[in-house]
Image (spheres, rainbow, N blue to C red):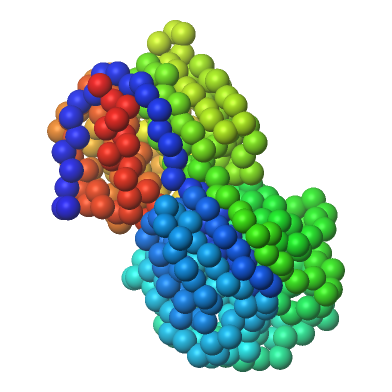
Amino acid sequence: MQYLDLPAVRRTAGTVVLPGSKSISNRTLLLSALAEGTTEIRELLDSDDTRVMLDALGKLGIGIESLGGNAWRIAGAGGAFPVKEADLFLGNAGTAFRPLTAALALCGGHYRLSGVPRMHERPIGDLVDGLRQIGADVCYLGTEGYPPLEVKAAEIRLDGPIRVRGDVSSQFLTALLMALPLAGSEARIEVVGELISKPYIEITLNLMQRFGVRVERSGWQAFTLSGGQRYHSPGVIHVEGDASSASYFLAAGAIGGGPVRVEGVGRASIQGDVRFVDALLAMGVQIEMGDNWIAASAPASGRLQAFDADFNHIPDAAMTLAVAALFADGPCVLRNIASWRVKETDRIAAMATELRKVGATVEEGADFLRVAPPIGMIPNAVIDTYDDHRMAMCFSLATLGGIPLRINDPDCVAKTFPGYFAEFAKIVQ
């Protein structure tokens, strides 16, 4: 589909059952593949990114069986992948590309990893530098510091700390953490600079522990894995609903009256993006919450309160707040979001461009966005999505201003939420 015309919306209410978390799904797939034993994964996200990971694991010799209903059985290798030579195409899935690069570097084989053109523009140099510190043989096949990559067998040495930057992407640290148990020796990682997106590291550590590997953490500066640890299957594991995806529906409830309830994520979540709720509360939104559900309704005042806040901890869900700012009672500022620049697109530039199309006054900086809501929103805007699933989902919320608009390339939501627009249609009136 080249475009989707969305009608003007005035009210929202209803319930949405969330798809599985992308972050948890791809981490769980990789850990299941590396573990001893067979793992049954339930509620796995069905999306482009998880299909890319499943395809790659199959090419690497992992036994994969679909059980139907988003359930899969993964026969773990009990260590390194059995296939020692492969070409892997990983699309634009950072949650597949980065961790697989690290794992393959410790597998003693010869591999080539590539993706779509945008993936080849997303930096990976800090991860490669970290791997080279322990003797890994990883080479660039194109531009220095970026995919595609070639990985060759090498002697891995863990005789000193691995130093990795933390201020570009938390996925570099996640990749190293998940791969290092393959080496079998004690390992220590030291983070250079500020570690961004800390809640995503919490997801990694939580899942590693569920597969039997413990990591000792010294604040956010150092991580130590004792030697001799191996991944063991937990048997059956359930994937939480996606907290980032929840943000669109919760914001819809906040803007359009509500209540809108999401099921699959709540107070018991291990995902950092559940803290999107804190941002809504600060805007005056009425929130109810259980262990596995959240419901949002509009503020008693009827208008969202403006904000000026640091969103380093929830960079993906913060995109939803940039569009919600259209409905605030004053200018809103999103700070410490530099990581947006190296996502599926340059999200700061893209968000600024598209918000202006519906009438907002926007100022963008290297790591911030200031959004002043319009007096009246401009109808019939044509929103470009930049092959970025979150741009498409975020801008559906603009219709709550009572304006119709067109979303170009709506199928890009298949990266994480193929059924998004159908679910959105269920809660709007």
Give the quadrant of the C terminus.
Answer: top left
Residue 273 visible in the displayed image: yes
Q: Nearer the viewer, residue 74 or 200?
A: 74
Q: Is residue 232 above or below residue 250?
A: below
**Total count of labels:** 0
Residue drawn at x 40%, y 64% is 51
As displayed, is residue 160 above or below residue 304? below
What residue do we see at 33% from left, 54% from top?
414
Q: Residue furthest top?
A: 301
Residue positioned 52% across, 28% down in the render: 294
The image quarter in which residue 147 lies:
bottom left
Q: Is residue 238 left or right of residue 119?
A: right
Residue 15 coordinates in the image, percent (x, y)? 40, 28
Q: In the image, residue 118 lies at what x, y percent?
A: 36, 66
In the image, residue 249 sits, relative to residue 62, either above or below, namely above
Question: Residue 135: x and y, percent?
Answer: 70, 86
* Res. 164 in view: no
Point out residue 324 in the picture as x, y percentages from the top left corner: 39, 29
For residue 108, what is the image quadrant?
bottom right
